[in-house]
């Protein structure tokens, strides 16, 4: 128990360390006075529709050199990010108020689109030096922090909509002295050593904050069209009166302006993301973890007491008897000892079980490694799409482990390696095939909506190439290694004729499905924060907590599956294989039910059948992955428990 306590204290320490330090994910860039810095724009997003759209799908000002897309990684493309350059130019430590452009008169289509995006609460996501724009708003006396700013706003009890056309930026900068370290980065391209000649250049300013206040201002379009981009204009205060705001209606010409103020800050560059990653509800996380720990240790105590007092007593009593007494005892007693000749009988659909266990091992390994790396700070949100990219790469290369685990289980069950190639192919195609079907259906919905969230055809071919050129060969190689590994030998012989299973008052599957409530109890608090991160656009960076929750989930799944397996064996039910898998895997049903509950009660603003279909599709994919991972944990634990249990019995 003392060892468990020390491990828990270490995990707490690691989680706190991870919350205090992280690898920022992009290299520091220093700027000199007057250096030009251009903001970038990401896709327009909304918590009402979950359908991202391109920034330039609306009549915004375009940069003089034309629209250029930024290089995006695999994760960004799959997440629907589309980062483009913008016309917003800043000059380091130069406070100014500038004119951008005036649109041509709005036509019917543009007015309809602007009104629709405004009423669906779409946000413009702007980025400066890899920092998203922050906006602060007060609600009921509480300051709330948002990323991005709205396309427009609709006053209550009014059919009119007003566009945000004037932005007041505040850029926080920190003076870099150059005496802390001699190696810095050059933007996002790489790292370099500062020479003596470059030190003066390095002694500049770092951008450590980016805030925006959006306004709607009505300008005289005829007067403003005489100006050129970046001409100075008078600074304006955000008007409170609607008659001074820019309405969205046909034939209106909208003028876009902005002003920027540079403010010195004591925040250092490594800490600049702290404002975005402020952990909300830390006390809730700790209460959830402590509650789960109490339940787990209580259950573990009960499990060990049962096994020590029941299993060991039965084994001792059974082994102390002579052969005659054992035969008489077998006639008189019932329980797990009577299924000794059937307990390792091949289960129904054994190939499917091997496939699901193989894929479950891969998904579990991917989740553990990803969360460990994220907890150590290697997957900062500053590196957009890095988390998803890392998960996909890990999934591909863990095909070796999946093929090995699935084929070795196949050899153990069948007693031969025959058919291992077919099994390896099935493992390589099972979960990716399910994901491919779900994502293809969802992609057609996104294509029909002209959303940037739709996966391009070129990316489809890239994903297929990764699947068949990396994942499949590695899984086949892992399967080959599985054929060379020593098969697990069963400790008892299997009878030729199956033993009849006594009738039960209630179906055994009812108990199996009910067992999933316990693992779900360790998950559901963290699920709320994860769902809020995915669907409400909030940053999720408490991976230290998530790592602890994952370890607790593994322990609970193992305990629940072992207890259920023992209970089934005690009532002479030797068909434990699939029940051991679903005893812990049934938590996925509760996760999916919770996601529907979250949709109904927490995402009430989600509008339209397309948005609901997207939500349900992604939730279903997540539930299937959780079922495979948790089911595999429970099955493997039960398998080794049953193997150990019956290897302790002397059988003639």
Image (spheres, helix red, strand yellow):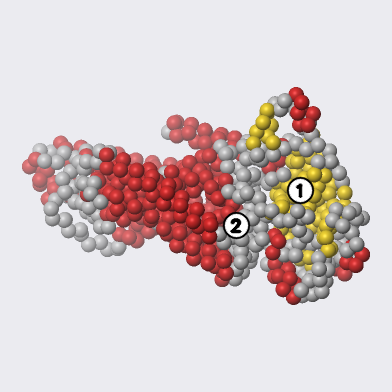
Horizontal side, residue 466 vs residue 246: left or right: left
Q: Where residue 356 appears, x then y in whole percent?
A: 35, 53
Please identify the quadrant where the C terminus is shown: top left
Residue at image position (57%, 39%) is 378
| Relative depth, front residue between 308 and 341 | 341
**Residue extending furthest toward the left:** 324
- Quickly name the residue at label 1: 38
Q: Is residue 110 above or below residue 287?
A: below
Is 116 situated left or right of 639 in this image? right
Q: Is residue 130 visible?
A: yes
Q: Residue at x 73, y 56 (%)?
A: 66
In the rendered structure, find residue 642 and report the number of the disc placed on it: none
Name the mark on residue 80: 2
Q: Earlier in the sequence, mark 2 or mark 1?
A: 1
Q: Secondary structure at mark 2?
A: loop
Distance between mark 2 and mark 1 Cα atoms = 22 Å
Front of the two marks 2 and 1: 1
- Residue 354 location in percent, x, y? 31, 51
Q: Position of residue 69 (x, y in %)?
A: 66, 53
Q: Residue 270 is drawn in which quadrant?
A: top right
Number of other residues with Cα within 10 Å of mark 1, as a class: few under 14, some 14 to 19, many 20 or more: some
Q: Quadrant of residue 33?
A: top right
Quadrant where the N terminus is found in the figure: top left
Q: Is residue 393 left or right of residue 104?
A: left
Residue 188 in picture, x, y percent from top left: 66, 40
Element carrying mark 1: strand
Instruction: Tell which residue pokes out farthest to the front in this image.
Output: 65
Near-viewer residue (367 or 577): 367
């Amino acid at each position: 128990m003392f060892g468990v306590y020390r491990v828990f204290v270490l995990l707490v320490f690691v989680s706190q360390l991870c919350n205090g330090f992280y690898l920022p994910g992009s290299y520091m860039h220093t700027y000199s006075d007057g250096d030009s810095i251009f903001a970038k724009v990401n896709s327009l997003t909304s918590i009402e529709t979950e359908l991202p759209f391109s920034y330039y799908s609306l009549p915004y000002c375009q940069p003089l050199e034309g629209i250029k897309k930024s290089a995006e990684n695999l994760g960004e493309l799959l997440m629907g990010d589309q980062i483009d350059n913008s016309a917003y130019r800043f000059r380091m430590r130069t406070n100014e108020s500038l004119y951008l452009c005036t649109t041509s008169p709005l036509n019917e289509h543009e007015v309809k689109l602007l009104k629709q995006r405004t009423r669906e609460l779409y946000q413009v996501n702007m980025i400066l030096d890899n920092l998203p724009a922050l906006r602060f708003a007060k609600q009921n006396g509480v300051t709330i922090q948002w990323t991005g700013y709205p396309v427009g706003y609709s006053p209550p009890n009014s059919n009119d909509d007003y566009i945000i056309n004037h932005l007041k930026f505040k850029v926080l900068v920190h003076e870099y002295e150059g005496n802390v370290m001699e190696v810095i980065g050059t933007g996002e391209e790489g790292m370099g050593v500062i020479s003596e000649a470059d030190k003066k250049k390095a002694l500049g300013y770092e951008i450590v904050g980016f805030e925006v206040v959006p306004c709607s201002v009505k300008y005289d379009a005829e007067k403003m069209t005489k100006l050129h981009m970046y001409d100075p204009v008078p600074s304006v205060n955000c008007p409170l009166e609607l008659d001074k705001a820019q309405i969205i209606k046909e034939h209106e010409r909208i003028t876009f302006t902005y002003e920027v103020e540079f403010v010195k800050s004591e925040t250092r560059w490594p800490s600049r993301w702290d404002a975005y990653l402020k952990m909300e509800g830390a006390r809730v996380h700790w209460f959830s973890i402590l509650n789960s720990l109490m339940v787990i240790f209580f259950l573990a105590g009960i499990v060990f007491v049962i096994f020590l007092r029941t299993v060991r007593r039965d084994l001792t009593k059974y082994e102390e008897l002579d052969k005659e007494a054992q035969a008489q005892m077998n006639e008189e007693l019932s329980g797990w000892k009577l299924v000794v000749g059937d307990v390792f009988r091949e289960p129904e659909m054994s190939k499917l079980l091997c496939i699901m266990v193989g894929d479950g091992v891969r998904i579990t390994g991917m989740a553990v490694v990803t969360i460990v790396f994220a907890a150590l700070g290697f997957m900062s949100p500053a590196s957009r799409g890095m988390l998803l990219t890392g998960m996909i790469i890990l999934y591909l290369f863990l095909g070796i482990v999946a093929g090995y685990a699935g084929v070795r289980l196949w050899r153990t069950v069948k007693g031969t390696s025959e058919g291992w190639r077919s099994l390896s192919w099935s493992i390589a195609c099972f979960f990716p095939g399910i994901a491919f079907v779900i994502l293809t259906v969802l992609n057609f919905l996104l294509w029909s909506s002209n959303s940037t969230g739709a996966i391009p055809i070129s990316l489809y071919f890239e994903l297929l190439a990764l699947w068949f050129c990396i994942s499949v060969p590695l899984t086949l190689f892992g399967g080959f290694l599985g054929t060379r590994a020593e098969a697990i030998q069963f400790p008892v012989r299997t009878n030729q004729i199956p033993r009849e299973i006594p009738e039960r008052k209630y179906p055994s599957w009812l108990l199996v499905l009910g067992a999933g409530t316990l693992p779900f109890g360790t998950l559901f608090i963290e699920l709320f924060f994860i769902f809020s991160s995915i669907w409400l656009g909030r940053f999720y960076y408490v991976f230290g907590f998530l790592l602890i929750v994952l370890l607790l989930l593994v322990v609970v799944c193992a305990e629940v599956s072992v207890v259920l397996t023992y209970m089934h064996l005690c009532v002479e039910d030797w068909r434990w294989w699939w029940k051991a898998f679903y005893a812990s895997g049934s938590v996925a049903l509760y996760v999916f039910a919770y996601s529907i509950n979250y949709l109904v009660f927490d995402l009430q603003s989600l509008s339209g059948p397309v948005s609901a279909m997207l939500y349900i599709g992604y939730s279903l994919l997540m539930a299937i992955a959780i079922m495979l991972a948790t089911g595999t944990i429970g099955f493997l634990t039960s398998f080794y428990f049953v193997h150990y249990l019956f290897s302790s019995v002397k059988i003639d």
